[in-house]
Image: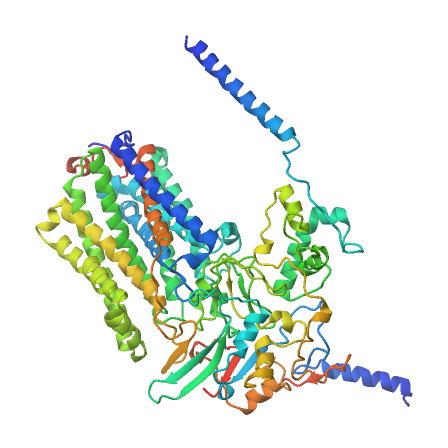
Amino acid sequence: MATIHYSELDGRSAGFFALLALLAVMVAGGLGGAWYMEHNGHYVTGMSNRIVWGVPHVFAVFLIVAASGALNVASIASVFGRELYKPLARLSGVLSITLLAGGLAVLVLDLGRPERLIVAMTHYNFKSIFAWNIFLYTGFFAIVAAYLWVMLERRMNAYSKPLGLLAFLWRLILTTGTGSIFGFLVAREAYDSALYAPLFIIMSFAFGLAIFILVLMAACGGTRRPLGDAIVVRLTALLGQFVVVLMYFVVVYHLTNLYFTGRHDFERFILVDGGVYTALFWLGQVLIGGMLPLALLFHPIWSRSRRVVAAASVCVILGGLAQIYVIIIGGQAYPLVIFPGKEVASRIFDGVIAIYAPSLPEVALGVSGIALALVLTAVALKVLPLLPRSLADRDVAAVPPGNA
Amino acid sequence: MSLDRRSFLGLGAAAFAGAAITPGLRLIELVQARSPEEAASTLKRWGLLIDTTRCSDCEVCVTACHTENGVTGHGRPATDAQWIRKVTLSDKRTGHAQALPLMCQHCEHPPCVDVCPTGASFKRADGIVLVDKHTCIGCRYCVMACPYGARSFIHETVTGQKPDVPRGKGTVESCTLCVHRIDRDGQPACVDACSKDGGKAMVFGDLNDGAGELRQRLRREPSIQLRADLALNTGVRYQGL
Amino acid sequence: MKFKRDMRSGASGATVFLLILAGLAAVAASPHARGAPPVIKIEKPGQCVEPTALMRRDHMKLILHQRDQTMVRGIRTTKHSLKNCIDCHASPKTNSVLGKEGFCESCHTYAAVQMDCFECHSPSPRAPPSATKPLAVRTGAAAAGPVAAARVEGAAR
């Protein structure tokens, strides 16, 4: 009966430093973009008074949602006691922290007054779901950090189950809150739905796991640590199941909207004549984010190839970004319906589909969130013993119970 | 036992005061100019009545508001702030056309106040919905939440502000019902301009004052709230829609 | 051997540190170190609303307290109001409290305390009262005279 040996990455190869350098450049680009937006004011971006949340928010929400889901693997290990996932729990915990850090960094840097972050963290209006989210995010950092510590410190391993449970419940509440940021908005046709909370939960499961799979494969592949089929097959099946449930929620959301006559105009906008939003919905969200990964992940032969699994994970991520773009930006592009049954016009674009073209500083900031998450993960892998030396089948199947 | 005149007057005054505080009766504030030490109070609730049948394609309300509050444009209509705008409506089935000014509705249950994470968006005691720019972090969630599109985010550095109306980059703002004028017993600039140069379509007043012109008109004539289905109990009411 | 090497590197490190300290001290002591002293021109006659010592120490506390009173509660007493300060302290030449010799800015630059008040607030005084038109009186208050009797109203709302 072998125990799992974790060790830090060597992290001295040229490839590793090249990766760090590339990611650092991307982060610097994002910081530059944020400075440019803050210094000149947001008129230099594509955002406007009709579309106040743009590409930075798409990336930020994606990262925050994925962060919550990336903790899934650790939860399955600690809370549901599946031995097979226990060696992956540490990486899962760290990835959830770094993804959340990346998402929050983008969100904060896009604020109109980012220097007032202290104000945001000391003045809470607890009727606001956004305030709850800020509170839940900071709590998440603390809880997952504690959870990681009890996993890393052998003498504290016994506490990994209760802390894992706390982290699991906390992130369910957190993701429900993130979805409710949109679900609670009565004003807009696109939002105003209780379905957003569970939709975001299942989005987190799918996106978080897709990112986890890619990071795991990259970390093991880059350091030549064996990664056995037992783990990959399980993760593949899990991702496929998550994508199925995700598609189910998307179908229910649109079918319900289609049943309400009052929502027909909005559904026509998303499904038929919304231009870029329609394209992102059908090609991005449904095809690339749904149908294609399902075909790849459930195919009896293709799903056995590591490359196919990685490709499917990339598809889920791209589909997720498209989905969030349609939710956030498409939802704002569609005009407010203040006067039902009337055609509305004004000097500030009432009644028309708002135009939005992402600008370079916005995209740089959004992408830098991903880069920040990855560079923090890479550094964490080098500094902490997060990755088992071997995840080959013979090494993981033999993990004795109770060893986190 | 007979009462002398002094005692009688004293008793009468006491009875009068007693009657004044019997349950069901309320003393409203003295009808005089509000002093600066006085805080805004819930006894008043400011509101507007807009008769859209008197509204044409004139925009004096918009010009007056933006002049009064120092809201300057930069030739960028998508990002320029707009505290009040003229909206033209045309019925999709019948083609009937109308126009009306649209501004912050100063709801009793404002969604923008509910969603603000720092509490910068708040409702003053007398019903005016404001943004405390000292606490606003510029997250724009209130802009997402407002059903009327009344809020604007300031997208550029602001200079030349009016001393009574501070506004700056990176915060969110909307119609303040000219709170600086109201606190000096005046009316919003849009109402003044409409009464003087426009269609005389706007009436401003205290929704709690049963004897005031605003309440009299609301009681006599039909009026609606915009997005009445949201049950926000707006302070701005419209006629002729 | 290793001990001698450690001692030598320790000594060179300490030397560098002391040199840096000396350099900083020299710079700090020089007359250019503290920047231009603040220009405090009191152009309007009369006293400030509070004693100078209190203002120097606590003007921010007064401003913050007043801001919450005015913003949230609608209390517009003039004694500690920012507009009142600016009306008096703005330079008649530049019509502002900002600028190299502005009342607020020159002191704040000297003390290296950043203020972001004037990102939103106007640094210029209000136009004198005679120049403004009287505000239109609200309808319904046309009968306002001086203290009228309190009106008792029925519960009709």
- Vertical side of B177 occupied by A222: above or below: above
Decide if residue B1 is on the left or right side of residue B67: right
Decide if residue B12 is on the left or right side of residue A227: right
The N terminus of chain A sits in image quarter = top left
Q: How is the image coloured?
A: rainbow
The x, y position of residue B228, in whole percent, is: 45, 80
The x, y position of residue B236, in whole percent, is: 52, 79
Image point (46%, 15%), residue name: C9
- Vertical side of C35 occupied by B86: above or below: below
The C terminus of chain A sits in image quarter = top left
Decide if residue C59 is on the left or right side of residue B87: right
- Vertical side of B160 occupied by C57: above or below: above
Q: Outermost residue, top direction?
A: C1
Residue A72 appears in the figure: yes
Which residue is nearer to you in this view: B162 or A387? Answer: B162
Q: Outermost residue, bottom direction?
A: B220
The x, y position of residue A199, in whole percent, is: 30, 62
Which residue is nearer to you in this view: B1 or A99? Answer: A99
The x, y position of residue A396, in whole percent, is: 20, 38
- Vertical side of A93 occupied by A361: above or below: below
Q: Quadrant of residue C84?
A: bottom right
Looking at the rendered structure, the number of numbered marks drawn on it comes to 0
Q: Quadrant of residue A47?
A: bottom left
Q: Outermost residue, left direction?
A: A301
Image point (31%, 37%), residue name: A20
Q: Quadrant of residue B193?
A: bottom right
